[in-house]
Image (cartoon, rainbow, N blue to C red):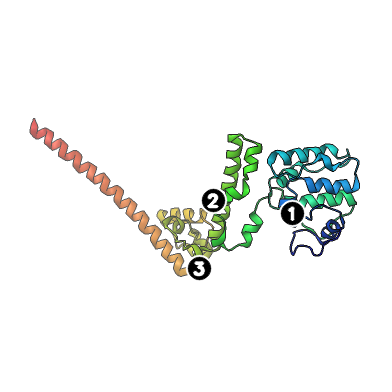
Amino acid sequence: MSYAQSPKKTGLPREVVKWLQSLDLSLYPKNVRRDLSSGYLVAEMFSQYYPQDFPMHSYDKGTSLSTKQRNWSQIQRSLQKNLHLMKEVIDGTIHCKPGAAELMVQEVYTVLTKRSIRNIRSPESDFTDDNYQELLPTVARSTASTAIKNNLRITEIMAVPDVSTNRRKAEVILHRHLRHKAAGRVLSPGQFKVKQDLGHLAATPVSSICGEECSPSSGHITSSMHQVLYSVTTGMGSEYPANVHKCITHWVMIIRICIFSVELQIRMYWGFTEDTKLRGTARGSSK
């Protein structure tokens, strides 16, 4: 059975596409992720080489989750002892995870033809859409809810209807999404209009810009207050000011914050003292 044309982009190596075209399949997998999910076409591939072990009347073309699980369990039972497919890849193919079906076809091709695939990079084992999201501009990437929806399929929840397990999966996806979002803010702060607050400014190290002139060993910083500020600023943060002017500005702001905190403590102390004196005077007059 020949096919007039192959799909423009299948995500498969050229030799694997040619091999699929040479097989007498009932349906050519134009959408590999969708067409291989049920396992029927995979059973047809094995039946081309082992017709006795893979009778096609034992498999169903349905698309329900129960049908998919039944077909794939039948395939696993029919495989010979020296042939096996990774369970993670099977689960990813059933749930239409990104990259799982492509890896499944490559694995079946390697098992049946005893050939190795050249110049091919295997997808990530977690079968997420992280690679696709990295190709998109920052404004077009998924939100938190969309990331959970894309990476936690409804069939996964139906296959393992455990609330705690699915909650852990959602938390992992959410944490990964937040981590990527934070990395994007660091790489392109102007796009998000990120403004440095006092915490970021106070955490900016100064010694890398001022060099020896700002170090306490050079003699320019002699007071205990300056030494404390030096130790704080050099022990925190990882971003550096662009020039010495910013360095001086940050120093002035830090000193102002410290002076304000000291003045506030003094005012609170004198206010407490005056209040105590007034109370003592009032008690003496009442007596």
Q: Quadrant of residue 134?
A: bottom right
Q: Say which of 9 and 66 sits in front.
A: 66
Three-letter code for the amino acid on which mark 2 is drawn: Ala
Total numbered circles: 3
Image location (x, y in percent) of residue 43: 82, 45
The residue that label 2 is drawn on is: 144
Image location (x, y in percent) of residue 246: 45, 67
The residue that label 3 is drawn on is: 242
Which tag is nearer the camera, tag 1 or tag 2? Answer: 1
Image location (x, y in percent) of residue 137: 58, 63
Is residue 159 depicted above or below 191 in this figure? above
Q: Earlier in the sequence, mark 1 or mark 2?
A: 1
Badge 2 density bin: few <14, some 14–19, many ≥20, Cα 10 Å? some
* Tag shown at residue 32: 1
Calculate the distance from the C-alpha at mark 1 to the C-alpha at mark 3: 51 Å
Calculate the distance from the C-alpha at mark 3 to the C-alpha at mark 2: 34 Å
Q: Is residue 234 left or right of residue 134?
A: left
